[in-house]
Amino acid sequence: KATIMASLAYGIDVQFDKAYVEGITKLQGQDIRYAEQMGYRLKLLGISKRVNNGIELRVHPCLVPSKCLIANVEGAMNAVMVHADAVGTTLYYGKGAGSEPTASAVIADLVDMARMQSADPSHRVPPLAFQSDQMSTDPILDMSSVVTSYYLRLRVADQAGVLAKVTGLLAQCDISIDAVLQRPASEGESQTDLIILTHNCLEKDMNHAIGEIQKLSSILAPIVRIRKEELS
């Protein structure tokens, strides 16, 4: 869906193999709870953006502000948020699953195809809405070139200096911090969770930072990383 909509929006070829796809199997209940404490909800989003050096095309879980309309889409409902030059941001919301919504969409496509048969060939709307000589050659970006912000959950030893070491390594990778949440260790525990929200940075810089932080002896489990979109 994200690939087709990107083609319609930007006039690029359909390139399913270029889309970055990450599912929800690695999400944990504690991350949902921490996100809610910090004013966010977790949603699986398909995202496409035109940026200076190409087009982002990615599908993955995201933290989105709980006050956003798209954060409150539940059950069989789907939503598409579109930002355009003239109209600004609009949201299209409705049922996306079930026999009747699916049948309605299929019949609408068949009606469009039937109408096309009687249209003057020179006036038909092309399949991707762009004439062949107007198609864009903008590249789809590799995930390492994407700029976004992040939620990090670190299982750390409950000892002095851990936060300073982690924030120092983030700073070395040119990553600034938006918020920090540290759960107090329970009585008798020697470890705790450290939650960090970052500002926007390059994915490759975040990958490098996570690799360096993971090497610290005070990091006791694999670091959990979830991307964050403010949708402002």
Image (cartoon, rainbow, N blue to C red):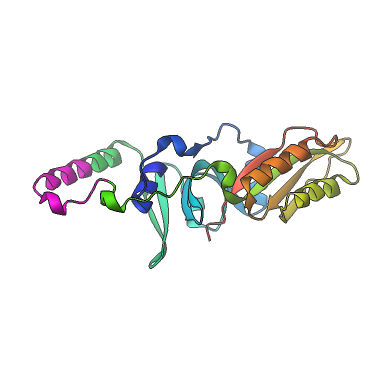
The location of residue 37, given as percent across then percent down, is 67, 51
Displayed quadrant of residue 188:
top right
- Residue 69 seen in render: yes
Up the image or down, 60 lies above or below 173; here it is above
Q: Quadrant of the N terminus?
A: top left
Please give left or right for residue 201 compared with residue 190 in the image.
Answer: left
The location of residue 207, given as percent across then percent down, is 67, 41
* Residue occupying image coordinates x 47% and y 39%: 19
- Residue 129 seen in render: no
Tell me if residue 120 is in the magenta stretch.
Answer: yes
Please give left or right for residue 129 compared with residue 71 in the image.
Answer: left
The location of residue 159, given as percent across then percent down, is 90, 42
Q: Which residues are magenta?
A: 107-127
Displayed quadrant of residue 88:
bottom left
* Residue occupying image coordinates x 14% and y 47%: 116
Up the image or down, 2 lies above or below 28; here it is below
Please give left or right for residue 119 compared with residue 167 in the image.
Answer: left
* Residue occupying image coordinates x 89% and y 46%: 161
Tell me if residue 78 is in the magenta stretch.
Answer: no
Front-most of residues 141 and 98: 141
Instruction: Count every numbered label the image shows and give the total.
Output: 0
Identity of the residue furthest to the right in this view: 160
The location of residue 182, given as percent across then percent down, is 78, 48
Classified by dominant secondary structure, the portion drawn in magenta counts as: helix
Front-most of residues 40 and 227: 227
Identity of the residue furthest to the bottom in this view: 86
* Residue occupying image coordinates x 27% and y 39%: 100
